[in-house]
Amino acid sequence: MNEVQQSGLIVNRIQSGKNSPMRDFIPENRPALVLAPMQDVTDLPFMRVVARRGAPDWFVTEYFRVHPGSKLHPYIQRSIVENATGRPIFAQMIGSDVDSLLRTAGELAQLPVAGIDLNLGCPAPIVCRKNAGGGLLREPTTVDEIIGALRDAIPGRFTVKTRVGYASADEFSSLLEIFRKHRIDGLTIHGRTVLERYQTPVHPDCVKLAVESMHCPVIANGNVVDVETGLAYLAHSSAAGLMIGRGAIRNPWIFSQLITALEGGECSQPTHRDLLAYVLELYDELAGESRNFIPVAHVQRMKKTLAYISHGIEGEFEYQMRRAKTPEDFHQICHAHLDHDAPLPTKPPVDSKLFCGFGALLG
């Protein structure tokens, strides 16, 4: 990204956010950087580990499931009340029952949150079948009702995370009218439809349309795997910032790297030994949160995260990790493959099934 492009991004960001309650969280001299909420991943231990490698500008909790009988999940609450990263945190809700969402928003407002976010993007089939998350995008009238009710009820910051449509990006312009109508304080857009899940390139043109249409800052999400793809997404969309999920699991240094790049510096390149330290630190942090530590179960929990971390590492690290069963297996495999100072690959494999289509941002 050249100086003209970068200057344009900053001017656009300042203009789109200058009258928004989100302005306190968006840096003056660069786009904002946010850790995406990922269920069963972005909990308190993960936030702590990532923050030590360069914290994002704000966090968003895993979603609180909301329905008539729901209560605030105690473990997710801890990511709010015990957040010692020094960065603000937004609480995210997912659900479709208006009364329950209003009740939960009131409960969350009593906690030290920077704002409340509504999830309209989760593509998980079980969520969509319940007409929540991305499933709600099939019913724009219901989305209109929910956002209107929450906007009236939430005195503080109210933001929305969405996809560009359920089945087609052609649905996006009508969704934008709803978001504009209720003057939400921030909009994060995962640039795929619900049905595209994570298997296609993103649609940066939809994000750019939102930037040009909305009164609030627009954050781009999806397919950011390294500094180059992040800068490209910003250049294509003119978004006020980036929200990064899977790319931050794989590379927890991505926020500090992007800040360095946006400020004109030269990014450091982590080594395999840096990755080893990250993995072992995350292992210990998560183990420390277990009330009833079961070694084999903990290894299985770590393997879910290692699926993203090990992806693209040369040799048999990924293959062997999938077969690890005990803590001894886990640590032996990690040390055997990561205890050296060769630089890590910057990007996942081009044909990656976990990071699909990121190359389109660079084309």
Image (cartoon, rainbow, N blue to C red):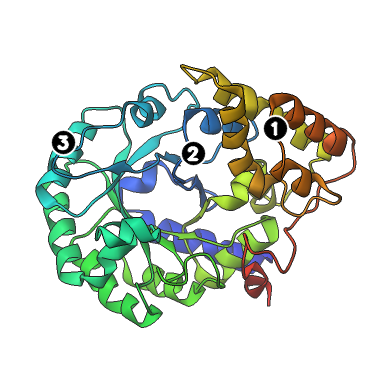
- Residue 67: x percent and y percent? 18, 45
Q: Which residue is mark 2?
A: 42
The amino acid pointed to by label 3 is: Gly
Observer-nearest of 28 and 337: 337
Residue under pointer 3 = 106
- Give the secondary structure at mark 3: helix
Q: Is residue 271 above or below residue 312?
A: above
Of the two numbered discs 1 and 3 in the rendering, the one whose residue sits closer to the viewer? 1
Q: Nearer the viewer, residue 86 or 123?
A: 123
Q: Earlier in the sequence, mark 2 or mark 3?
A: 2
**CA–CA distance in space, label 1 to label 2:** 15 Å
Helix, strand or loop at label 2? It is loop
Residue 298 in the image: state x and y as whole percent. Answer: 58, 28
Horizontal side of residue 301 vs 106, given as left or right: right
Q: Is residue 187 visible?
A: no
Label 1 and label 3: CA atoms lie apart by 37 Å
For the C terminus, the image quarter is bottom right
- Which mark is first along the chain, 3 or 1? 3
Q: Which residue is mark 1?
A: 278
Q: Disc 2 marks which amino acid?
A: Thr
